[in-house]
Amino acid sequence: DGELYIGWGRVLLLENIDRFGSISAAARAMKLGYRNAWLWIEAMDRLAPTPLVEKATGGAGGGHTRLTEEGHKAIEQYKELRARFRGFLQQAK
């Protein structure tokens, strides 16, 4: 329906979530607003077969966020597709 599922910026956000365990830290690392990060995650989760991100609200130690298996798979598939596309462009020259 013309909605963006995944792109380089969203992959970077997912990788940063995996790295930092936090949406806010991931967004800060990208100089991306927290609200935009949430909107991206919500859009990806809505369009994916299963959620890409699993969130747990805080307690004494605070909350955390982690990628699901589907989130890791989405990153891997995006990078593979991007590499294949680059190869295609090199052959077309």
Image (cartoon, rainbow, N blue to C red):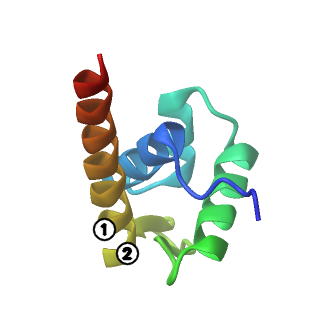
Residue drawn where x is 75% and y is 48% of the image: 35
Q: Considering depth in this image, is 31 or 71 the residue closer to the camera?
A: 71
x, y (%) of residue 63? 50, 67
- Looking at this view, name the residue that lies furthest to the front: 92
Quarter that holds the C terminus: top left
How packed mark 2 is, by other alpha carbons closer than 10 Å (few <14, some 14-19, many 20 or more), is: some
* Residue at the disc numbered 1: 73
Instruction: Determine the residue positioned at 67% across, 66% down.
Output: 42
Element at badge 2? helix
Image location (x, y in percent) of residue 60: 49, 71
Three-letter amino acid code at disc 2? Glu
Give the quadrant of residue 12. top left
In whole angstroms, how far apart are the C-alphas of marks 1 and 2? 5 Å
Residue under numbered circle 2: 70
The x and y percentages for residue 37 are: 64, 48
The one of 54 and 43 positioned closer to us in this rendering: 43
Q: Circles 1 and 2: CB distance less than 8 Å?
A: yes
Outermost bottom residue: 50
Secondary structure of the residue carrying numbered label 1 = helix
Could you tell me the amino acid type at mark 1? Lys
**81 over 49 or under it: above or below:** above
State the count of labels: 2
